[in-house]
Image: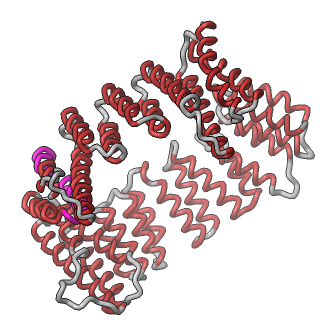
Amino acid sequence: MAEIIQERVEDRLPELEQLERIGLFSHAEIKAIIKKASDLEYKIQRRALFKEDFINYVQYEINLLELIQRRRTRIGYSFKKDEIENSIVHRVQGVFRRASAKWKDDVQLWLSYVVFCKKWATKTQLSKVFSAMLAIHSNKPALWIMAAKWEMEDCLSSESARQLFLRALRFHPQCPKLYQEYFRMELMNAEKLRKEKQEFEKADMGVGNLDYPEELLKGELARIIYKNSISIIKGAEFHVSLLSIAQLFDFAKDLQKEIYDDLQALHTDDPLTWDYVARRELEIESQPGEEQPTMKKAKAVEMGRKEERCCAVYEEAVKTLPTEAMWKCYINFCLERFAKKTNSQFLKRKRLERTMFAFRKAHDLKLLSEFQYKQWIELLLHHDFLKEALEVAVAGTELFKDSGTMWQMKLRVLIDSKSPDIAMLFEEALMHLKPQVCLPLWLSWAEWSESAKSQEDTEAVFKKAFLAVTGADSVTLKDKYLDWAYRSGGYKKARAVFKSLQESRPFSVDFFRKMIQFEKEQESCKMANLREYYERALREFGSVDSDLWMDYIKEELNNPLGRPESCGQIYWRAMKMLQGESAEVFVTKHAMHQAGHL
């Protein structure tokens, strides 16, 4: 193996001699490069090979190439690239070939190879890399698209890109993304050919000898792809995606109309079709004969008309297709328009009216989802329509009795209304809901009680909650209880709560850290109490939390009442308890802390 490494290092000598001779690197730097190269060569020539060693080798060579480039720029020397850079690029490609042959399935490695070739290698070399990658990873459509885009955009070869897409579709005949990108590519190619033809005509150069078939210029190939794809991939979503792509190209008006007409004919039973048709009204400009609005008020009126036309389409849609999904599209449109900023009070009022009307109509038809009830209530609360919000919340909880979200919305309305029946409603909600979804409700009850009721009432809520909430959910409840105790009764109350809960597992590490912080905030901070909290925390988290051990050691070192002599014992206890990576992290942090104190 030593002979191979020696030979590989000697192969570098001509380029290194050139680097020194032309003054890009000093003799000492060349020696350092040879030493580093020997180490890197050893790692990729040994029997047990690791991918990281190949990556490190490549990264070193790339850094060297970039350094050479910067130094060339600095001294203004641009010769001898064949002997220097090309030699390094060739060597890196060899390393990439070995690595990609051994770790064929690593897509990230292949992509790194592609990125390197894009920057440093020739187009022919990159084309070969794409071919090798696709031979192994033919099951990944994204890689086919990447290769085809490169052929189209970088190599300006529409034919090569077309062939790649056709090969990809043989492997993935049902892949929508492939059809979309192939469709886009053919339209881009048609647009490019049209521009070329126009440039020739402007320059008064004859185009008789050049081949510009009328079908290509009109985007006929894109139309064929469209027809084939919709016969294979059904659904309005795919159809709309092709129409959106076609609309990016001004010359393809006929194709756009054909796709739009087909969408309406083939997918009348899909809400997405109606949604698209309705939203299209926003993009339709005033007729050529009509006067274009110029004043702000006139523009607002014109936008109002467009939105009215959209809503007229939606109204027809919900009659033709009276489903929850269709109403969702209608309501989402109304909410989006309402959220648009405008200085026009006329537009604001009209948008709010439309939105409320859509919510009310869908509610009457029992076609509102739980999430939309929530949206409706939030909108009503935002505009202080408390009475209407309560009516909607009552209807929502009747329909979705097992929804914690709906009960929370109802309670929020009652709290905003300052209703006297809130505590009773909390109890009613908890009767209807499953225990596993009740935590947010208990927390809301405690929060409301803290602001509206006595300390005893709030504590009673927390104690009731602990009887109902168990397992992982109780962790959050304990943290909230401890925070409330410290806010309402100070340290003494917090310590009493801590003592009452300290055997009620599970806990979060924050539960103990809060008590440590509360203790430190006291004028007469007791080290014995801090040790008690640390020890209790370490009983629960000592095997996984290295920070806890480090903080304990720092406390003993830095606190005036601490015992620095016990730090060694704490350190060895930590080493026995911590597992895996946690132990390694602890050793590193401890070493850094000690170095900082030297």
* Quadrant where the N terminus is found in the figure: top right
Q: Residue at x 71, y 35 (%)?
A: 23
Q: Position of residue 534 (x, y in %)?
A: 75, 40
Q: Which residues are magenta?
A: 226-251
Residue 147: image quadrant is top left
**587 vs 519, nearest the viewer:** 587
Q: Is residue 239 magenta?
A: yes
Residue 521: image quadrant is bottom right
Q: Position of residue 564 (x, y in %)?
A: 90, 36
Q: Residue at x 29, y 31 (%)?
A: 139
Residue 150: image quadrant is top left
Q: Residue furthest left?
A: 265
Q: Residue at x 33, y 71 (%)?
A: 394
Residue 157 falls left or right of residue 173: right
Residue 226 falls left or right of residue 153: left
* Quadrant where the C terminus is found in the figure: top right
Q: Is residue 541 above or below residue 384?
A: above
Way the structure is coloured:
secondary structure
Whether residue 368 is visible here, answered yes or no, is no
Q: Is residue 243 magenta?
A: yes
Whether residue 135 is visible here, answered yes or no, is yes
Q: Position of residue 187 (x, y in %)?
A: 22, 54
Q: Is residue 354 above or below residue 522?
A: below
Q: Position of residue 450 (x, y in %)?
A: 60, 67
